[in-house]
Amino acid sequence: DADVTQTPRNRITKTGKRIMLECSQTKGHDRMYWYRQDPGLGLRLIYYSFDVKDINKGEISDGYSVSRQAQAKFSLSLESAIPNQTALYFCATSDYDTQETQYFGPGTRLLVL
Amino acid sequence: DAKTTQPPSMDCAEGRAANLPCNHSTISGNEYVYWYRQIHSQGPQYIIHGLKNNETNEMASLIITEDRKSSTLILPHATLRDTAVYYCIVRVATDSWGKFQFGAGTQVVVTP
């Protein structure tokens, strides 16, 4: 089984709808991250969490919110989806003991109509 | 974190070694060099990282110059499945920000 899983893998939604992307990990890592990837722009950090009580904004957090329900689960919500949030979303985990090597999930492809 | 410079693309013949260069002339003494790759639309995959010594694992070797201003990732026997975008990233291993700055990377195409 994969160490970092994301659900759903693909999602189509309409403008204004609220959606949630979920991430689970079995690596036992404390730190979890949400990135988005747009063509030609590389990965950009949305939110990150160093433990269940610690949530931090990344470089592009506007329009997004997160919840760290447990050490192993980190969810990303789009409160009111808009078309320019169409992107590929990745969850990642890391740990101090592994010198912050990040391990990524398979991604969620989101299309907002 | 220091910036990196990589060639935008390179080709490699299947079975041959692929040598991917990365320049990081402004690297600081406490910054590590990490390599990741991303096969089309999949999640980035960790390959290797190092500080100053050369490193080798089951996937690749990392050669860091003595002055640490550049490095080379070596895939010893490239296969078609190694076709991917390869990212060279430098950052402090234990900084609290935890962010990886993914640039444009090098598109590697392995041909039969």
Image (tube, coloured by chain):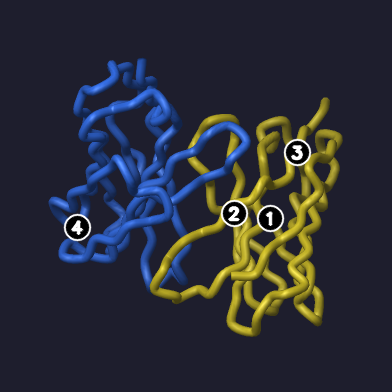
Chain colours: A blue, B yellow
What is the distance, in whole Å, between disc 4 and disc 3 at their CAs?
A: 36 Å
Residue A29 shows in the view: no
Residue that carries the numbered disc 2 in the rendered image: B47
Q: Earlier in the sequence, mark 3 or mark 2?
A: 2
What is the distance, in whole Å, between disc 3 and disc 1 at their CAs?
A: 14 Å
Residue that carries the numbered disc 1 in the rendered image: B60
| Mark closer to the observer (4, 1) | 4
Chain letter of the residue carrying label 3:
B
- Which residue in the rendered view is the most extreme toward the bottom? B29
Residue that carries the numbered disc 4 in the rendered image: A71
Q: Are marks 2 and 1 on the same chain?
A: yes
Tell me whether circle 2 and circle 1 mark residues in contact (CB < 8 Å): yes
Q: Quadrant of residue B96?
A: bottom left
Task: Check disc 2 and give the amino acid type.
Answer: Ile
Task: Check disc 4 and give the amino acid type.
Answer: Gln
Residue B108 image position (x, y, % from top left)? 75, 38
Residue B74 image position (x, y, % from top left)? 76, 55
The local crowd at label 2, few if under 14, some if 14 to 19, many if 20 or more residues have their Cα within 10 Å, is many
What is the distance, in whole Å, between disc 4 and disc 1 at their CAs?
A: 31 Å
Q: Are marks 4 and 2 on the same chain?
A: no
Chain letter of the residue carrying label 1:
B
Task: Check disc 3 and give the amino acid type.
Answer: Val
The local crowd at label 4, few if under 14, some if 14 to 19, many if 20 or more residues have their Cα within 10 Å, is some
Task: Check disc 1 and give the amino acid type.
Answer: Ala
What is the distance, in whole Å, between disc 3 and disc 2 at their CAs?
A: 15 Å
Q: Earlier in the sequence, mark 3 or mark 1?
A: 1
Q: Are marks 4 and 1 on the same chain?
A: no
| Mark closer to the observer (2, 1) | 2
Residue that carries the numbered disc 3 in the rendered image: B108
Chain letter of the residue carrying label 2:
B
Residue at x 61% of width, y 45% of height: B37
| Mark closer to the observer (4, 2) | 4
